[in-house]
Image: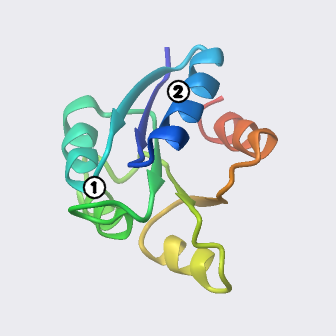
Amino acid sequence: MKRVLVVEDNEDNLTLMLDVLGSLELDVITATDGDQGVALAQQERPDLILMDLSLPRMDGWTATRIIKADETLRDIPVIALTAHAMVGDKERALQAGCDDYLPKPLNLKELAQKLSQYIG
């Protein structure tokens, strides 16, 4: 079973992600801030990380940079999830090390396509 780490501080968004990913029979682990996200990535070695960029304690930009700087984690795909959908935000997310980008509110069909692309 594929394991997905969801790093999201908004309870409603997290519930939606758990419902969607659970229905796809994925093993889901969650973190509510960037510090927890980095720690769980190191401990659990997920197959994919869905990273909110606006997080407490450590933002998703920084957490992604730390994950991608770790040679044992750098091959894990990170998809940015963000309400930051302004011009340049996608490029900024990719520069931080994210492999892909999904704006919020999430388009579930687009999310399913990205999941298929990255973890089958």
Q: Check disc 2 and report its element: helix, strand or loop.
A: helix
Q: Is residue 86 above or below residue 112?
A: below
Tell me, what colour scheme is on the image? rainbow
**Helix, strand or loop under label 1:** helix
Q: Residue furthest front?
A: 12
- The residue that disc 1 covers is 34
Percent x, y for residue 77? 49, 48
Whole-percent x, y for residue 37 in the image: 28, 46
Q: Amino acid at mark 1?
A: Gly
Q: Position of residue 56 (x, y in %)?
A: 28, 61
Q: Residue at x 75, y 39 (%)?
A: 108
- Classify mark 1: residues with Cα within 10 Å, few (<14), some (14-19) or many (20+): many
Mark 1 and mark 2 lie on one chain; the one further toward the N terminus is 2
Of 14 and 116, which appears nearest the observer?
14
Check the image and report above or below for 44 versus 31.
above
Residue 120 numbered mark, or none:
none
Please tell me the numbered disc located at residue 18: 2
- Left or right: where 27 falls relative to 86: left
Real-space CA distance between mark 1 and mark 2, rounded to the nearest whole angstrom = 18 Å
**Residue kind at label 2, given as amino acid type:** Leu
The image shows residue 112, relative to residue 65, as above or below, that is above
Up/down of 36 relative to 93, above or below: above
**Which residue appears at 31% of the width and 67% of the height?**
65
Residue contact between numbered discs 1 and 2, judged by CB atoms under 8 Å: no
User: Which residue is painted at 43% across and 67% down in the image?
Assistant: 97
> Along the line of sight, which residue is nearer the eye, 115 or 51?
51
Q: Position of residue 70 (x, y in %)?
A: 23, 56
The residue positioned 49% from the left and 14% from the top of the image is 1
Q: Can you say which quadrant of the picture contains the C terminus?
A: top right
